[in-house]
Structure formats: structure tokens, C-alpha cells
Amino acid sequence: GCGPAEPAELSIVAAIHAYRSAARWLLGDALECRADAATAMTMADESADDAALASAHTVAAMIAAVDGDRAANQVHYMRALAHAETAGDVLQIIRIRTNRGSRAIEEGNYQEGLAELDLAVDLGCTRIEYGPAINAVKTSLLDVEPTEIHFVSRIPGMTRAFAAVLPHTVLASAAEEG
């Protein structure tokens, strides 16, 4: 009816705005991205739904990254991850860890980035279908050079992440260069 929205309705609308914001972020439509992100956060807060809050904080983190606000980016991703874990939203956890890992790798923090991606790979391999989750992690590793792969593959647990997402030929090439 015309009465106030129920929390479940608010959480659905919040998620729609969050995902629309992310799509607009990808398209470079900053103004509409920010508007949808603000609406998503307001509705997610009102709903108190952890999955909706995870989505809203994820797009807030993406916007903070574009703004160059690393502190806000980290805070929003920490909140997003906490809400996604509380909600048991495995896909959101994978998305958040993949985004955090990608950011760390872009900044040259390979050990931190690969640790995040390793956790995302573990979830993708054990909790949901293998393919969709691993494809997100693959995208984050596209800019890693073979010599960097050799270096970081020596970090405990990282070889498994690489083996799950990179073709064998890339790993062999990295081993030869190391």
C-alpha cells in the first residue's frame, strides 16, 4: 500500500540502488553513481539489513577510491565485509575481498593483495560454484607481471591462489624467470 516501507522492501530497494550505483561507476557516470550510492546507504541504514549494508558500503568504498580517499575506502570496505559476513553473503564477501585485493596490488602491496585474493579463492572453491568467483579474482591479477608472480608465490599460501586462477603456462614462465 501507501504506508511506510517495510524493512525487507527497503533492503531490496537499497540493494538495487547499490548495484545500479556500481554499474554507473563502471560507466563513469559519477553524478548518478553518487546519487544511487547515497540512496542505497540511506535505505540500507533504515532497513538495518546486513546484506543491503554490505552492498551500500561497497559502493561507498568504490566512490572513495575514485576520490582518492584511501582512509574512507578502507573504512567502508571493513564495514562492508563485517556486514557481508554477518549476513552470510558469500558472493559479497568474495566481491569485497577481490576489490580490496585488487586495490592492494595496484598500490604494489602484493602480499596484502594476494592474501585477500587467496581468501576469495578459498570461498569460491569451497562455498559456491568455482567459475564465477574465480573469474572475479582473475581480473584482479591481470596486471601482475610473471616476475612478481614468482616473488609473491613464495609467500605461504599464495601458490594455491595462483594455481586456481592463472594458466599453467604463466606459472611456468614465472618459475623460469625466478
Image: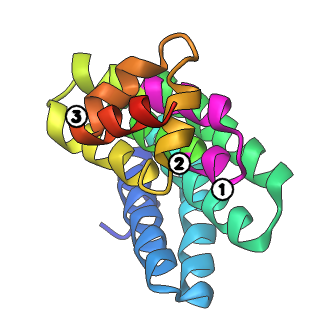
The residue identified by callout 2 is 99
What residue type is disc 1 on? Ala
- Disc 3 on helix, strand or loop? helix
- Disc 1 on helix, strand or loop? helix
C-beta proximity under 8 Å, tags 2 and 1:
yes
The answer to whether 33 appears left or right of 75 in the picture is: left
The residue identified by callout 1 is 61
What residue type is disc 3 on? His
Q: Considering the whole magenta stretch, tell me its main secondary structure.
A: helix
Q: Residues within 10 Å of mark 2 (few under 14, many from 20)?
A: many
Question: What mark, if any, has residue 113 been given in the picture?
Answer: none
Residue 125 point in image, percent of width and height: 24, 22
Q: Nearer the viewer, residue 37 or 104?
A: 104
Q: On screen, 149 above or below 16?
A: above
**Which stretch appears magenta?**
102-119
Q: CA distance from mark 3 to mark 2?
A: 24 Å
What residue type is disc 2 on? Asn
Residue 95 point in image, percent of width and height: 43, 44
Give the mark, 1 or 3, whose residue is nearer the N terminus: 1
Report the mark closest to the observer, 3 or 2: 3
Q: Nearer the viewer, residue 112 or 32?
A: 112
Residue at 53%, 89% (x, y): give it: 29
113 inside magenta stretch: yes
Residue at 69%, 72% (x, y): give it: 66
Q: Residues within 10 Å of mark 1 (few under 14, many from 20)?
A: many
Residue at 36%, 70% (x, y): give it: 2
The residue identified by callout 3 is 168
Q: CA distance from mark 1 to mark 3?
A: 34 Å
Give the mark, 3 or 2, whose residue is nearer the N terminus: 2
Q: Nearer the viewer, residue 37 or 70?
A: 70
